[in-house]
Amino acid sequence: MTGANLITMFRIYTHDKIKAMDGSSDDLLWTDDEILQFLSDGERAAAAGHRRLIHDTTPAVAEIAVVSGSSFYTIHDKIIEFTDIALYDDAGVTCHRQLRITTRGELDDFRPGWQHETVTGQPEFAVHDDTGIVLYPTPDDDYTLKCGVFRYPLECITQGSSPEISEQHHDDLVTYAMYKAYSVNENDKNALQLSAKYQQQFERIYGSPARVQYARAGRANRYHRSRICL
């Protein structure tokens, strides 16, 4: 479904219809642009949820050029988390190994003092920070990282575009949009009750922000084996 289709669904569910005889939209409670923003926010929340809906391996998002002597690399701003990181030669042809995805705390336990070392070599570990990854040891040559990632949608939903997540989840985006729409009027008790109802419906499927963060932290601390590519 397109953004226009989802707006229609939203207005049907919320009974937000044009009532004026002249067809004026002045009496609508929410504009199309507001609803599209709610829908886009919902797609981001769904993608970040425990179902992790959008997986990507395309070079534009999930490929990183590694330069000898440099350990930190900025990642695409839509990446939520890495599922795997493979270390290839500079040409991206020969795979050397799968890197172990870890945290600073885990690497501190495994390699005490690693942040203060000047060790170079073929990287074995990748630490995912907020906006980038840190490789250890510091690369001794130029390489290419080919990654699998879960990410946010690349674009906001428009009237003519469709969400990136599959159509089976589109009704849930409308649920999220209703949650956000009804939450705007803090003085309307009935609206706030409806907002809470739709929030619970959405989070029952995709998780609350706190639960999503907790689950992601658990995945980050899970053991990711470093192995040689065959």
Image (cartoon, rainbow, N blue to C red):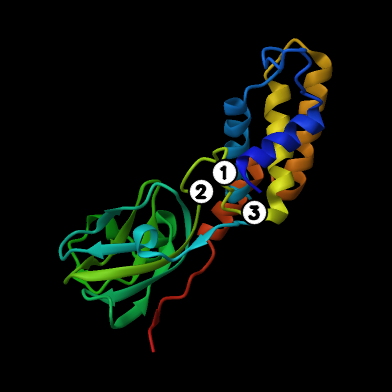
**Which numbered dot is residue 186?**
none
Distance, label 1 to label 3, CA atoms, is 12 Å
Residue marked by disc 2: 153
Q: In this rendered view, identify the residue nearer to me: 15 or 198.
A: 15
Q: Residue furthest top?
A: 187
Q: Is residue 214 above or below residue 31?
A: below
Q: Is residue 222 above or below residue 199?
A: below
Tag 2–tag 1 contact (CB < 8 Å): yes
- In front: label 2 or label 3: 2
Distance, label 2 to label 1, CA atoms, is 6 Å
The tag earlier along the polypeptide, 2 or 1, is 1
Where residue 165 appears, as percent x and y from the top left, is 61, 54
Residue marked by disc 3: 50
| Left or right: 146, with 117 as reference point | right
| Left or right: 146, with 13 as reference point | left
Q: Amino acid at mark 3?
A: His
| Left or right: 175, with 68 as reference point | right
Q: Quadrant of residue 62?
A: bottom left
Tag 1–tag 3 contact (CB < 8 Å): no
Where residue 11 appears, as percent x and y from the top left, is 75, 30
Residue marked by disc 1: 44
Q: Residue furthest bottom?
A: 230
Q: Amino acid at mark 1?
A: Arg
Crowd class of label 2 (few under 14; some 14 to 19; many from 20; radius 10 Å): many
Crowd class of label 3 (few under 14; some 14 to 19; many from 20; radius 10 Å): some
Q: Residue at x 28, y 83 (%)?
A: 94
Dot 1: what SS? helix
The tag earlier along the polypeptide, 1 or 3, is 1
Q: In this rendered view, identify the residue nearer to me: 57 or 71.
A: 57
Q: In this rendered view, identify the residue nearer to me: 205 or 96.
A: 205
